[in-house]
Amino acid sequence: MKKSEFGRWSRVAAEWSEKYLADIEQLPVRAQTSPGEIADQIPLSPPESGETMESIMDDFARIVPEGMTHWQHPRFFAYFPSNAAPASMIAEQLAGAMAAQCMLWQTSPAATEIEVRMVDWLRQAVGLPEEFKGSFQDTASSATLCAVLTMREIALDWQGNQKGLSQQPTLRVYASTRTHSSIDKAMWVAGLGQENLVKIETGEDFAMDIAALANAIRTDRENGMVPAGIIICVGGTSMGATDNVREACELAKAEGLYTHVDAAWAGSAMICPEYRQLWDGADLADSIVFNPHKWLGVSFECSAHFVRDPESLVRTLAIQPEYLKTYGRDGIINFSEWSIQLGRRFRALKVWFLLRAYGLEGLRTMIRNHVTWSKELCEQLKETPDFEITTEPILSLFTFRYVPESSSRDEEDLNRLNLQLVDAINDDGRIYLTQTNHDGKLVLRFMCGQFDTTEEDVAVAFEVITSVAKKLA
Ligand SMILES: *Cc1c(COP(=O)(O)O)cnc(C)c1O
């Protein structure tokens, strides 16, 4: 393909994309393919000579969409959303044209400076104080790993990177039993080990028991171990479990521990002031991550990572002589020193396009609608015989299960029945839901968060859930 053909094929791609999005409701939300079906259509070896764009594009249209689960589908109610608003997709194309590589200020002054601004726009949007600075990382998993590494280095007086961990005291990190698996993985990768992630039981409110946390810290100190930090969960993946951020941060301060808030999904909702009580006290944390690529419409990947003290993050991650490890010296920021990877994408561009194209008020309306419709559906299911709400809505996420009058009520049978139900719903194709294990019960999650979802789509969800369930019984 020649450079001179770029415009033509971009237009073909744009037209394909526009039609795809216009017709997306006709597609089953979850891919209906069996394993291997797509791979079988791709040659085993690469071509020796170039092929025409016509045939490449034809194969794409023939093979790929059918093998995809459609995250942009307005009836995607599974997992958490991964939205790509049109303005954000356009920005991605432009960033691609420039082959932007944003590791240093020098390699991308505009990208770096727009990133500084966009992180600050988002900071204001979610109501965090001015001292928080930050960067856009690929995913929350990476931001959490960076936070765990920072905890480690602070606790080891900056010796971990240099000397390794074999001669060091045992470090301990605390989190609730309901946190995301990315916390466990961060512990593995940081070399701290699964066993040193102390999982604290949660109370009836699904929040970490602060007295138990204080106890665990004290016991660890008595046993010669070194507490390093606390990971605080806001809007956990399974059912939205949320810790008491203020109490956890106050305890951390008293104990001299670093705190990281994982608000990967729920953080986007903090653009609405009325939901901010959910993370009340977040302004006391050392590090916070949330994913604009989940609920705000910024296309994947884009995680906003805020830190109160960039110095400690940069001191942990910058491979530089000590005297240069100063954040923002001479007005220059090299964002590769804020994350694991050296090369970085121009993520700020899509945030800039998105925030300007929809405005905070437009995004707030979307999020408020999702929360309202989810609550309405929850109420409707509550009033429907044979359905049980297992956890009440946290923002736009709740869980429920099917407990028909005729069923045996044996927990194992109910789990089996509900797994059958979620499979049958997803085979039907009109909506997509996922299940979770909530305290031993297999329950269905309903999460409303797709950019184009309407109230009618949520009504279809009610129809599908109840009619498919009736057929099962
Ligand atoms: C989605 C999610 C993550 C992981 O996010 P990635 O950006 O995919 O790494 C972590 N924590 C919570 C609570 C999440 O919802």
Image: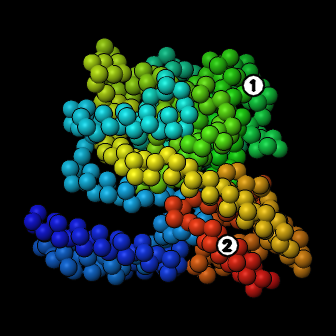
Give how far across and how far down residue 467 sits, in percent. 73, 82
Specify few, some or many for label 1: CA neighbours under 10 Å numbering under 14, 14-19, or 20 or more.
some
Query: Is residue 237 in view?
Result: yes
Give how far across and how far down residue 90 sits, in percent. 32, 58
Disc 2 residue: CB within 8 Å of ligand 1? no
What is the secondary structure assignment of the residue under circle 2? Answer: helix
Which residue is found at the position 26% from the left and 54% from the top?
94
**Quadrant of the rendering where the C terminus is positioned:** bottom right
State how many labels appear.
Answer: 2
Which residue is found at the position 30% from the left and 18% from the top?
329
Closer to the chain start, of discs 1 and 2, is 1
What is the secondary structure assignment of the residue under circle 1? Answer: helix
* Residue that badge 1 annotates: 214
- Residue 426 got which mark? none
Q: CA distance from mark 1 to mark 2?
A: 45 Å
Position of 192 with respect to 313 (left or right) is: right
**Quadrant of the rendering where the N terminus is positioned:** bottom left
Give how far across and how far down residue 177 sits, in percent. 70, 43
Up the image or down, 425 lies above or below 298; here it is: below
* Residue type at numbered disc 2: Ala
* Residue that badge 2 annotates: 459
- Residue 193 occupies quadrant: top right
Up the image or down, 354 lies above or below 343; here it is: below
Position of 134 with respect to 179 (left or right) is: left
Give how far across and how far down residue 207 sits, in percent. 74, 40
Specify few, some or many for label 2: CA neighbours under 10 Å numbering under 14, 14-19, or 20 or more.
some
* Residue type at numbered disc 1: Ala
Which residue is found at the position 62% from the left and 58% from the top?
370
